[in-house]
Amino acid sequence: MNSRLLLTLTITLTAVAGFGADNATSQPEQIEGFRDTPIIPGTRWHVHDPDRPQPPVVRPGATFSQGAPAPSDATVLFDGTDLSQWQNTRGQDAAWKITDDYMESVPRGGGIRTRGRWADFQLHLEWATPNPPRGSGQGRGNSGVLINGMYEVQVLDSYESKTYPDGQAASIYGQYPPLVNASKPPGEWQTYDIIFESPRWNEKGELIKKAVITVLHNGVVVQNREELFGITDGIHREVPWKTLSKYPAPHAPEVFIELQDHNNPVRYRNIWIRELGRRE
């Protein structure tokens, strides 16, 4: 065979093989989620839709509230010393462990919730997911801030780890993805500053004001006064997981804070809360 022809064939076959390899490695990333769930009102996306666009990634700057003392009118829920403000979901002493200045969920420890209740409040907390990271998607550093055990702001390792957008870190679970992904790497301390306005019902039991949530994740606004369609936590029989949310029976404006145990050793520290009050 002519040497020039042999060289041409070799180059061609190499290019074809290379194209095939590139094509094989450029398959779209598989993101967990569901396409058989209800459409979220006002959108064209399903609940937990893997095809929904991922929020843009931003690098957070310095966070004013990280490690900062609580305001003078705040109730300190955890300062690194004890769990006296917390109980398990059965009303018994909280079983999470304290190490250094943080608390951490333990296997089969269950979620913990505050002994106190507040209406219309500002909540600050700091959290960190395991490093090195374990698992992927919803199995990677999963926990949550459950307001009254019903309205969830998701805690998850969403740093270079994708899942359905309405279930990533700082999402209002099953309803609103964050406006941007402001996550830090696993093992680094992150902050949530949550402003919650309680829902209200009239004397007839009719809903007259929906719950409203604002969330700052690492100092970045990621939820801006979003009205909730209803409760978000799938453990409640009124709203099975993956279905469209609705409000439960009327409850008082004063609500507790619950930290979810999702069998991932997520850490929390520097937690405080203050009611917003009213102007005279």
Image: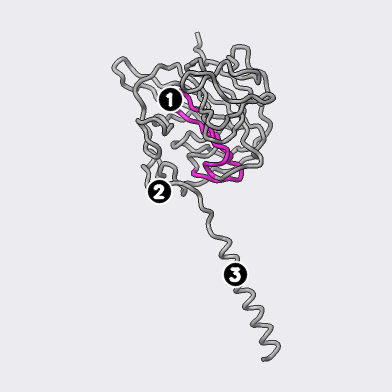
Q: Identify the residue under disc 1.
A: 211
**Residue beneath disc 3:** 19
Start and end of the magenta stretch?
137-164
- Cα distance, mark 3 to mark 1? 53 Å
- Left or right: 24 as drawn, with respect to 210: right
The correct choice, above or below, for 163 with respect to 231 in the image is below
Question: In the image, residue 196 lies at what x, y percent?
Answer: 49, 23
Measured in 3D between alpha carbons, the distance from the residue under mark 1 to the one under mark 2, in whole angstroms, is 27 Å
- When the figure is inspected, residue 39 is found, relative to residue 147, above or below; the finding is below
171 vs 230, left or right, is right
Label 3 residue SS:
helix
Sequence-wise, the earlier of marks 3 and 2 is 3
Residue 189: where, in percent of width, then height? 66, 32
Residue at image point 31% right, 14% down: 203
**Which residue is depicted at the point 58% across and 28% down?**
192
Alpha-carbon span between mark 3 and mark 2:
32 Å
Kindly identify which numbered label has been placed on residue 35: 2
- Residue farthest along the front direction in this orientation: 108
Residue type at numbered disc 1? Ala
Answer whether residue 219 is visible to the viewer in this image: no
Check contact, mark 1 vs mark 2: CB within 8 A. no
Task: Kindly state the secondary structure of the residue where label 2 is placed.
Answer: loop
Task: Indicate whether residue 274 is drawn in magenta.
Answer: no
Is 156 colored magenta in this rendering?
A: yes
Q: Residue furthest left?
A: 204
Q: Are marks 3 and 2 in contact (CB under 8 Å)?
A: no
Residue 158: x %, y % from top left:
58, 41
Q: How crowded is mark 3: few (under 14 residues within 10 Å), some or many (20 or more)?
A: few
In screen coordinates, is 155 left or right of 150? Answer: right
In which quadrant is the N terminus drawn? bottom right
Which label's residue is closer to the chain start, 3 or 1? Answer: 3
Q: Residue at x 43, y 17 (%)?
A: 253
